[in-house]
Image (tube, grey):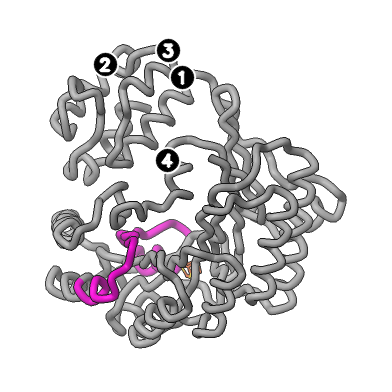
Amino acid sequence: MSSLYLHIPFCSRKCPYCDFFSQVGSQQQINDYVELLILNLQILKRDDSHPTPLNTIFFGGGTPSLLSVEQVGDILNKVAQTYGIASDAEITLEANPGTVNFEQLRGYYQAGINRLSLGIQSLNDQKLQLLGRIHSSSQARECIIAARAAGFENLSLDLMFALPDQDLLSLEEEISALLSFAPEHISLYGLSFEEGTEFYRQLQSGKLTACEENLYTEQYQLLHRQLVCAGFEHYEISNFARSDRRCHHNQVYWKREDCLAVGAGGHSFISRKWGTRWHIPENLQSYKEALWGGNNPAEKLETYHQQGAMKEFVYLALRTSDGVDLQEFEQKFNLPLQQVFPDALDKTRNYLDLPLTSGYCRFNLNGWLLYDHLISHFL
Ligand code: SF4
């Protein structure tokens, strides 16, 4: 597998809960940035002998749907010239329903985007307002219908839960409404209050209250039940897919496979030896200066030794329903999992889906609910 992530760090407005690298950008800034991305691709290719063609491409952000159809087309042409794109590549673009119309979606589809990830977040107008989203629930619904009419057969919808004052009944109604559009994929995000965000400040001042732990658990279990009953596979802690519609790009991350990245804020991983991670600093000025000077803006974050690679492999695999394949682990690292992590396996055994004699180590639903705590035993 060979993959590419492109980060688009612009949004129409900053949502008060968001700590992603994104900012409000002028049209001129976005135009200039697209030229930088294209230069970034050229320089990356010059310095890197990565296998081609690409199997997955992901425009993430920020709000990639602030790019025009022509800009997306120009970028994809450059990607095709530099790395090549496999004929069956999965090419995803994240879109905010408040920024697109039918013509634009049709244009993206014709330019080669074949998977659309829509940031719906909620189908309740009060919740959308609370979240500071720029779209209404009717715009979200119209956008899903427009995406289908534009030709998208692979649609992923994002939904947030654990929102202030959200009860089980209203969440159940929202997920039912979402399912009426028969999406191929659903990603769930439990609201968290990240330091530095407006929501964090409001939490500190008592203006907002976080969802209680028990209610969070009940909401997560409800979503799991409803989506599994509707025929979805719960294939990662926060992701559900119809058969054969898992997100191939994200699976590359969870399997610790190679992924290149361009754009300020992008992270890449090369699995050679035990693996190396790189990142491009979240700074538009330094990004521009590096590229204009003919330099690759990526900086090395971490070079792994075997121990670190084994920990990270397990950390990522246990997020997924595939879990750790014990035979694969042993082949990769020349050591059995049970020998590397005896204490962690002992402490987490009540949360495993199957006994290790099955050949797999994977968490059950309760294990996923306690993932942050349980995984610490392996790190
Ligand atoms: S649209 Fe997405 S990336 Fe942009 S501020 Fe809102 S949550 Fe963050």
Left or right: where 17 falls relative to 180: right
Q: Where the C terminus falls, by quadrant?
A: top left
In this picture, which residue range is highlighted in magenta?
176-204
Q: Residue furthest bottom?
A: 138
C-alpha span from label 3 to label 4: 20 Å
Q: Tag 4 or tag 1, which sits nearer the N-term?
A: 4
The residue under label 3 is 334
The residue under label 1 is 307
The residue under label 4 is 254
Tell me which residue sits at (54%, 51%) in the image: 56
Tell me which residue sits at (75%, 44%) in the image: 45
Tell me which residue sits at (65%, 42%) in the image: 52
Asked whether the beta carbons under mark 4 and mark 2 sit within 8 Å of each other, the answer is no
In front of the other: 131 or 207: 131
The mark lying in front, picked from 1 and 3, is 3
Left or right: where 68 falls relative to 127: right
x, y percentage for residue 242?
29, 57
Q: Tag 2 or tag 3, which sits nearer the N-term?
A: 3
The mark lying in front, picked from 4 and 2, is 4
C-alpha span from label 1 to label 3: 12 Å
The residue under label 2 is 342
* Mark 1 secondary-structure assignment: helix
The amino acid at mark 2 is Pro
